[in-house]
Amino acid sequence: MMKQFIGDREDVLRRLAIICQEVLAVDNIDLELTFVEQSGNSFSIVQLMSKIMLEFDLGMFEEIFTDKPTIRQIGELIYNRSKEAAVSYESLEYISIDDLTISSTPDLPYELPLLPNRYSFFLQRKRNYDYWILSTPAIELKAECDIGLLRDTLSFLFNYHDVLSTELRWINENTFTQHVVQKNIDEAIRIIDVEEGLSRLDYLEFCEQEIDKAKASISTKNNMFLVSVIKSSEFNFGLLFICAHHCILDAYSFRMVINDTFKLYSQASKGETLALAPKTTSYLSYCNTYLNFYRGKEYRYMDFWKGLAWEKYRPLVCYPELIAGSNTEGKSLFIVKDVEVKNAIEYSSKRYGALQYTCFEIMLSAITKAYCQLANSQALLIAVTLHGRESFAEGLDLSRTAGWLSETVPVLIEYSENVSKLLQSVSSTLSISMYKGKSFEYLANLSESKDHRAFINKLPRPQISINYIPPTFEQPNYHDIGVPVEVIGRGLIDRSDTERVFLVSGGMYFAHGKLNLSWDFSEDILDKEVMSLFSEKCMLFYNQIMNNLLKGSS
């Protein structure tokens, strides 16, 4: 039986404290006092129990009523109960993680289940699928690339990360299945020799053209992963360029694969045995676990979606026809606002205020306030991008699993003029959505219940998205193999045939000693001056909330 993974003790305690504050309508909670000692009564205890059951997917337990535990002891009860009891219906059968983990490579080819994130980005939309490409910059090699060693490297890599051997088989114009096949390594390597007599400038222009060709050769119907090597005996060095289709790898996985490539090539060049860290959960095991997990819990998650205050949300644009057609990503405008930070890693990992809020929770609170003022709304519906490595099922270890795990989940945040309550609302909502929000696309597209699919598909879809990339996000390590050449390999694929997924696509990231908040939108739909004001208000409110938390108030 699968158990709900709810986090460590401190995370449970933090989420419980937020619930207690909401029920008692207070700004601070003493963890060492009982609920009753902090103005709780029989009615509020029932409210507390109800919220705990919803937040942590637990059943009723009497200790809260009979033993008069402190808040800290309640947190311990929740943590221990979640470790002991399976959160499932007794009538449902589950596949264990052990049953799903593949100890050896299955017979080829085998089909990978299509996860819900495929439906939101690819299936059900007429899009330019070839736009979704991930790539490294051009890397100037320290020494001439040994093609034989590179071939050995990729052979090992493709066996280790089986998703790299994926091919898509199209059923019709908009639907495909994904299969892992026996891959010919030579198809994943592209060797280009540079003609003699070129100047340095002409050489760089030649490389740029070849990199554009490499990008153009990546598609869902052809190569999904390609390593290009540009050799030049005249300049005594070469360039390496790697690109992959997003349909097989998310950004985190791509960086992992790139680092593994460089590590293996370095081992091969030194005559060492090729080796990578053990991988516990295969991508196929992850896919099966994911689908099995939500298939068994969809009635419980339907209650969650039905219980949200959808009536409080007002969309930014109320005319769906404006979003489609000519309003493509190719006509996007970008607005970026920033705030200086001394140490990005320390800044992002630190928690602020008595209830220990993250900088992302603070930013999302600021965005909620700015949006509700802009749209005259009582709630914000926003698609939050998750990296997909949240351990929603006990036993999953996705630290070395490559594939497309990232996904966006709809998060409905109720607005409050009281900043303290707004922060609590954001923190609590994010915690719940981390586990329950992942069920949205499953219920919309993969549920066996027509009623479930119909209800979910009638709900409003987010018009705004936000993708938070912390500075600890694993970056490719090029140092052992070469140096990135920033002036080439940075061109973007033409997006003119790609319709927008969101009216406004946001990004929160750290760069050059600053915390940046960017917004990407279509000027055909939204006014630039309005979006500029919205962006300014987001950063204004963020600074106000952060400063208040640093001073010890909110």
Image (spheres, rainbow, N blue to C red):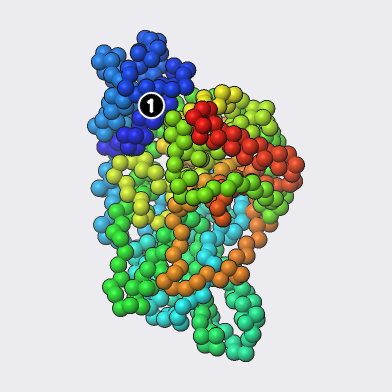
**Residue with the most extreme top position:** 42
Name the secondary structure under disc 1.
Answer: helix
Q: Is residue 465 above or below residue 169?
A: above
From this viewpoint, is residue 440 visible? no
Amino acid of disc 1: Leu
Quadrant housing the N terminus: top left
- Across and down, in percent, residue 48 comes to 39, 19
| Residue lying at 25% horizontally and 48% vertically, measured from the top left | 98
Which of 450/205 is in front?
205
Packing grade of label 1 (10 A; few <14, some 14-19, many >=20) is many
Left or right relative to 173: residue 160:
left
Q: Indicate the quadrant where residue 66 lies.
A: top left
- Across and down, in percent, residue 466 comes to 56, 43
Q: Which residue has dot 1 on it?
A: 16
Which of 178/61 is in front?
61
| Residue lying at 51% horizontally and 57% vertically, measured from the top left | 246
| Residue lying at 70% horizontally and 47% vertically, measured from the top left | 522
From this viewpoint, is residue 267 visible? yes
